[in-house]
């Protein structure tokens, strides 16, 4: 089972998909972090401006260590920006910072998918760890049960594992509208509030934000691939004749 060639292929495809997405965001950031924005705003200044124009007060904007570790914390009402974004005066810095401000806006406007995503975090973090282990144990038990013509505990365990692991896919699915929407809010604000000037700056921001969004799409696709694999291994897709 550990040397299952199908598992190897699925893993390699998943690795390639997430690798490509990471390369995409790295190269977009490398390119657009070298291009200064015409207004000379730092990421932190741009995010602050976007929040002010939206009438949003009481949001902290703090620097945080790490490469592209930028995020918004709803519980702390804080936007955290990586050093290159916080201090950077590039198109990339402003785009990423305004994307995070977009999340703060979603929070304040009670954007439903954001709330749903926050709710699904605990289940997904348990499911991501426990789901695959349950599938693996269940499949091994199932094989033993077939040999001994026993009960269906193994298969039951696989199904429960798939359900748990499926919560990760559900979380990643609900993440997509949240991320795309934060980027649309950022783009609208960057153009409308005059943060970026001219179509070339806008299209740079487009490329940057699209590349970032692709990492979330890739995460969902790789989870779905693994889900399909476990379902196939358990014979739930007709990949293995049962009974
Ligand atoms: Zn985001």
Image (tube, rainbow, N blue to C red):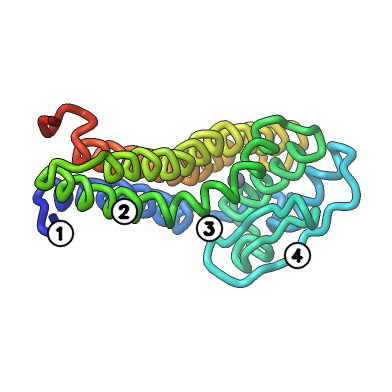
Circle nearer the viewer, 1 or 4: 1
> Around disc 4, counting alpha carbons within 10 Å, would you say few (fewer than 14), some (14 to 19), or many (20 or more)?
some
Q: Is residue 200 visible?
A: no
Q: Residue at point 72% right, 35% down?
A: 189
Nearest to the observer: residue 209 or residue 227: 227
Mark 3 lies within 8 Å of ligand 1 (Cβ measured): no
Measure the C-alpha gap from mark 4 to mark 3. 19 Å
Circle nearer the N terminus (4, 3): 3
Q: Which mark is residue 33?
A: 3
Tell which tag, 1 or 2, sits nearer the viewer.
1
The tag earlier along the polypeptide, 1 or 3, is 1
Residue depicted at x 9% and y 50%: 5
Question: Height in image: 113 above or below 1?
Answer: above
* Residue where numbered disc 2 is placed: 19
Percent x, y of residue 115: 70, 38
Describe the element under mark 2 as helix, strand or loop: helix
* Residue named by callout 1: 2
Residue at the disc numbered 4: 62
In the rendered view, would you say 178 is above or below 104? above
Badge 3 marks a residue whose secondary structure is loop
Q: Would you place residue 113 above or below residue 91 in this image? A: above
């Amino acid at each position: 089972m550990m040397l299952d060639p199908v598992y190897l292929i699925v893993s390699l495809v998943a690795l390639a998909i997430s690798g490509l997405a990471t390369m995409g965001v790295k190269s977009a950031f490398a390119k657009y972090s070298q291009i200064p924005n015409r207004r000379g705003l730092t990421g932190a200044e741009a995010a602050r401006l976007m929040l002010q124009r939206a009438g949003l007060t009481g949001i902290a904007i703090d620097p945080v260590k790490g490469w592209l570790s930028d995020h918004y914390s709803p519980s702390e009402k804080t936007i955290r920006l990586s050093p290159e974004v916080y201090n950077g005066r590039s198109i990339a810095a402003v785009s990423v910072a305004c994307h995070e401000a977009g999340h703060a806006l979603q929070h304040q406007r009670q954007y439903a998918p954001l709330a749903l995503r926050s709710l699904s975090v605990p289940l997904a973090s348990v499911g991501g760890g426990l789901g695959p282990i349950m599938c693996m144990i269940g499949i091994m038990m199932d094989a033993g049960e077939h040999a001994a013509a026993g009960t269906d505990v193994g298969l039951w365990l696989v199904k429960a594992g798939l359900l748990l692991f499926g919560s990760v896919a559900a979380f990643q699915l609900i993440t997509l509208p949240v991320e795309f929407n934060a980027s649309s809010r950022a783009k609208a604000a960057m153009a409308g509030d005059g943060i970026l000037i001219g179509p070339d700056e806008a299209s740079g921001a487009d490329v940057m934000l699209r590349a970032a969004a692709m990492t979330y799409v890739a995460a969902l696709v790789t989870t779905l691939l693994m889900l399909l694999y476990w379902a196939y291994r358990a014979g739930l897709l007709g990949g293995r004749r049962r009974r």
